[in-house]
Image (cartoon, rainbow, N blue to C red):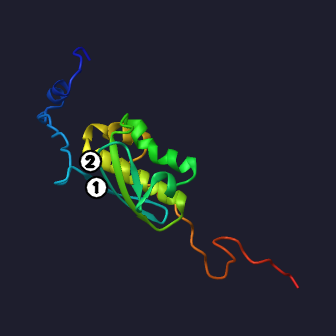
Amino acid sequence: MSDEINTLEDLASVAGVEATPEVELTPREPVRDEFGRSYATGKRKDAVARVWIKPGSGKVIVNGKAQNDYFARPVLQMVLAQPFSVTGTEGQFDVYATVKGGGLSGQAGAVKHGVSKALQLYDPSHRGALKAAGFLTRDSRVVERKKYGKAKARKSFQFSKR
């Protein structure tokens, strides 16, 4: 071909169709209640967390207890801090969370998921960093159920030929 096709308009003229106008994307608006808080629900395994964030000194309250008392293991505390470190907002938000179901590890994952969603609602500019880190996606891995006639989910009883 002698003429170069560099834009969509060039391609449309060669193909003989009308070029569609550019779609303008409206920027996301922050979602906050009358108290200046953002709310989100986080889930992991069987745990469900309701999370509120608001600007503050960085204290984290989970089920009425401080973060260090509820999640005593340093690994779980690190999991809760990940969304803030990714967005660069350590110590800028107070977190109030209620969490039910599952074990401590699942509950920490649920609170992390809820904090990530609430951060994204509070300031939509954080969405890119949180999505790239994979914090906005619910980790849907759950324990497989036990089947009838099996010892566990897949384990069979010992076979006896005689």
Judge left or right: residue 19 versus residue 40: left
How many labels were placed on the picture? 2
Give residue 30's position: percent from left, percent from top.
Answer: 20, 45
Judge left or right: residue 23 versus residue 66: left
CA gap, disc 1 to disc 2?
Answer: 8 Å
Q: Residue 48 got which mark? A: none
Give residue 18's position: percent from left, percent from top.
Answer: 11, 34
Give residue 71's position: percent from left, percent from top.
Answer: 52, 55
Q: Which residue is mark 1?
A: 39
Mark 1 element type: strand
> Which is nearer the eye, 99 or 92?
92
Q: Amino acid at mark 1?
A: Tyr
> Which is nearer the eye, 70 or 146?
70
Q: Residue at x 14, y 34 (%)?
A: 22
Where is 70 relative to 5, above or below? below
**Quarter of image, res 50:** bottom left
Q: Quadrant of the N terminus?
A: top left
**Quarter of image, res 93:** top left
Where is 73 relative to 124, above or below? below
Q: Which residue is mark 2?
A: 121
> Which is nearer the eye, 16 or 39?
39
Q: Residue at x 40, y 61 (%)?
A: 64
Judge left or right: residue 12 versus residue 52: left
Q: Amino acid at mark 2?
A: Leu
Residue farthest along the right direction in this orientation:
162
**Quarter of image, res 6:** top left
Looking at the image, is mark 1 or mark 2 earlier in the sequence?
1
Q: Are marks 1 and 2 in contact (CB under 8 Å)?
A: yes
